[in-house]
Structure formats: structure tokens, C-alpha cells
Amino acid sequence: LKQASHVQVASVVCCLVASAYTFSQSARLMLHAGFWFPVAAGDPQQRAAVEKIMVRSHRLQWMGWRWLYHVAWPVAWLAGGPAASLGASLALTLFFAREDRAPVAS
């Protein structure tokens, strides 16, 4: 860990910052939609706009989780070297192929 290159540390930091940013944007949009629910109760056009905001919030939350999944590889590279990063790459590939699904658009 003492000999970590700037690229290794920067890759971990970038993934974590991207995750935090997408989670915060998701929370911001959900808060915005929450304030609009009482206003949009009667008008179908405004209700559709609120639902669109909620779908966007949901997609940003998924992207935040994906950035957290992707940080596993740089952390393995930083902490364990090439062998650990290969293992993390294979495990992430299997995980994404089997478990991860795109959010459903409503």
C-alpha cells in the first residue's frame, strides 16, 4: 500500500466520488418529486412529469450501486496487486453477467 501509484489511488477515488455523486443526485431528485406529489395529484400531465423524475432518480441510484461494484477492482489492485485484481475482475464479470440487471423503466 505504501508503493501505490497515483493511478491506483486515483481510480479508487474516482469510483467513490462517482458513486457519491450519483447517490446524491438520486436523493435530490426523489426529494424534488416528493414536494411535487401534492401539486401533481389532480393533473395527469404534472403527474407524468413527477413519475419521470422518479424513474430518473431510480436509474441514478442504480448507477451509484454500480460505481460501488466497480470500485472492488481498483481496491483489489491497490491492496493485493495483479493476482487479486485478476480475481476481482473474474468475480465481477460473473456477478454482472448473472445478477445485475438494468432498472425497469415504467
Image (cartoon, grey):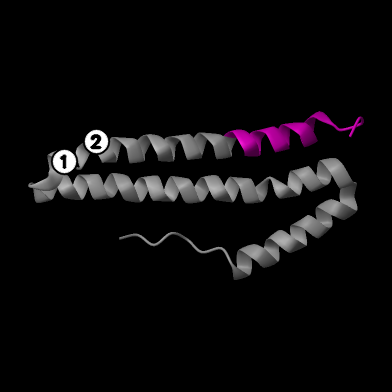
Quadrant of the drawing holding the N terminus:
top right
Mark 1: few/some/many CA within 10 Å (<14, 14-19, 20+): few
Tell me the tag on residue 35: 2
Left or right of residue 105: residue 19 = right
Q: In front: 75, or 10?
A: 75
Left or right of residue 72: residue 86 = right
Q: Residue furthest right?
A: 3
Q: Residue 72: horizontal and vertical position, in percent?
A: 72, 49
Does 104 lie within the magenta span?
A: no
- The region drawn magenta spans 1-17
Residue at 42 percent across and 40 percent down: it is 26
Q: Amino acid at mark 2?
A: Phe
Q: Amino acid at mark 1?
A: Pro
- Majority secondary structure of magenta residues: helix
| Residue 90 vertical position relative to residue 64 in the rendered view, above or below | below
Q: Residue 91: horizontal and vertical position, in percent?
A: 74, 62
Secondary structure state at the residue bearing disc 2: helix
Tell me the tag on residue 38: 1
Q: Residue 104: horizontal and vertical position, in percent?
A: 39, 62
